[in-house]
Image: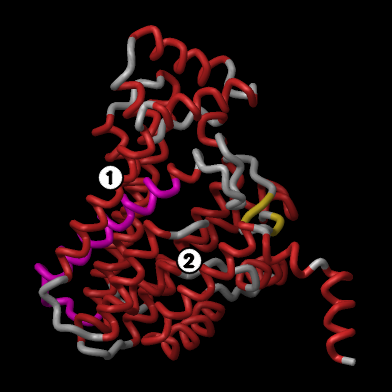
Amino acid sequence: MFNNLDSKLTKRFKVKKYFSNPFMCGIFEVMKITEQIKEPIAYEMELFEKKFQLAMSSKVALLNRITHYIVNRKGKQMRPMFVFLTAKMISGGTVNDRTYRGASVIELIHTATLVHDDVVDDSNKRRGFFSINALWKNKIGVLVGDFLLSKGLLLSIDNNDFDLLKIISIAVKEMSEGELLQIEKARKLDITEDIYYEIIRQKTATLIAACCSLGACAVAPEKAKTIEKMRKFGELIGMAFQIKDDLFDYTEDAIGKPTGIDIKEQKMTLPLIHTLNNCTSKEKSWIINSIKNHNKDKKRVKEVIAFVKNQGGLTYAEQKMVQFQQEALLLIQDFPESIYKDSLILMVNYVIERKI
């Protein structure tokens, strides 16, 4: 009876097809690894979610509906995980109220940037669901992002966490500068490798750096060298994370992000920059012309992707990504062995091995 039922359900809902989809398999793989990483901080993450929901509350009914929508469609929560794992590794397994507040501030700021990004990019989807601006229009999207940003800053101010506030404020400033630097350079397509590293350091790595330094500062505010070491650790992971994202643009796997989207948006990624620096002037002119004038042409975009692959652009980017990963791991090797350190190492490895 149950076998027949199972067979009927498989046919009806196409279960086999569902699980053979590379994107869906990638999601289940991520869930499995994420649960492993979370294990030593499972209690803290559960309590954090409750505190985070409270931190987003408002007297305005519309805001509460929107923030409820956001909370119910949360991502992998990697940033709060970095905060708690760093704090517990440094303290020997304990966290305090400052740790929870720090994790909440990070997630509030991160969520605010995502909401604003969707408005700027005119994106209708976020994590497979409709974005805030798609459901409530751009004006409300901007205001919701501003609300989340102010809630994050006030959470620190109201509790006199001025050292934590300084860390997050630097991150917000650098994220804005990174976005503007990328826009400025994208107009001329004259990004060197050094400028590219500065852009991704500010745009992506600075927030992960803030997570790790904030986690350390929350439990050991007097240990300036340790806080700086963890900031650098987070920055290196963030650099590797962004390069991995760049590589996804050249993959043929179904990862939920269309292949060639960065080229279509005229974003200069590391594989592309390396290729431009190591080809003939004629080939360089063809690539730049393709990106500037033919970036909507699917056939031309595929030709650029194939050229970058053949020129070793992906291999070079992968080597740089691993280099950043190895540098990050070296920074935490002297900390005592613990389940928290093991989870951080697993997290670092996941950053460059993830499929989505």
Type of the residue with mark 1:
Gln
For the stretch drawn in magenta, what is the main secondary structure? helix
User: Visible in this render: residue 184?
Assistant: no
Identify the image quadrant of residue 18.
bottom right
Q: Amino acid at mark 2?
A: Leu
Residue assigned mark 2: 108
Q: Is residue 227 left or right of residue 191?
A: left
Q: Nearer the viewer, mark 2 or mark 1?
A: 1
Q: What quarter of the picture does the N terminus occupy?
A: bottom right
Please provide the residue range marked out in magenta: 219-245
Q: Looking at the picture, how far across and down is residue 116, in whole percent?
A: 55, 49
Residue at 33% over, 55% down: 238
* Image height of 94 relative to 301, above or below: below
Of helix, strand and loop, which one carries label 1? helix
Asked if residue 242 lies left or right of residue 321, the reply is: right
**Residue 189: horizontal and vertical position, in percent?**
40, 21
Question: Is 244 a magenta residue?
Answer: yes
Residue 278 in the image, given as x and y percentages of width and height: 29, 21
Task: Provide the residue designation for mark 1.
Answer: 319
Q: CB under 8 Å between callouts 2 and 1?
A: no
Q: Nearer the viewer, residue 292 or 202?
A: 292
Above or below residue 49? Residue 265 is above
Q: Residue furthest top?
A: 282
Asked whether 23 falls inside the magenta stretch, the response is no
- Helix or strand or loop: what does disc 2 sit on? helix
Of the pair 325 and 56, the residue shown nearer to us: 325
Instruction: Give the Cα distance between marks 2 and 1.
Output: 33 Å
> Is residue 107 something one can see in this rendering?
yes
Residue at the image point whose x is 48% and y is 66% from the top: 108
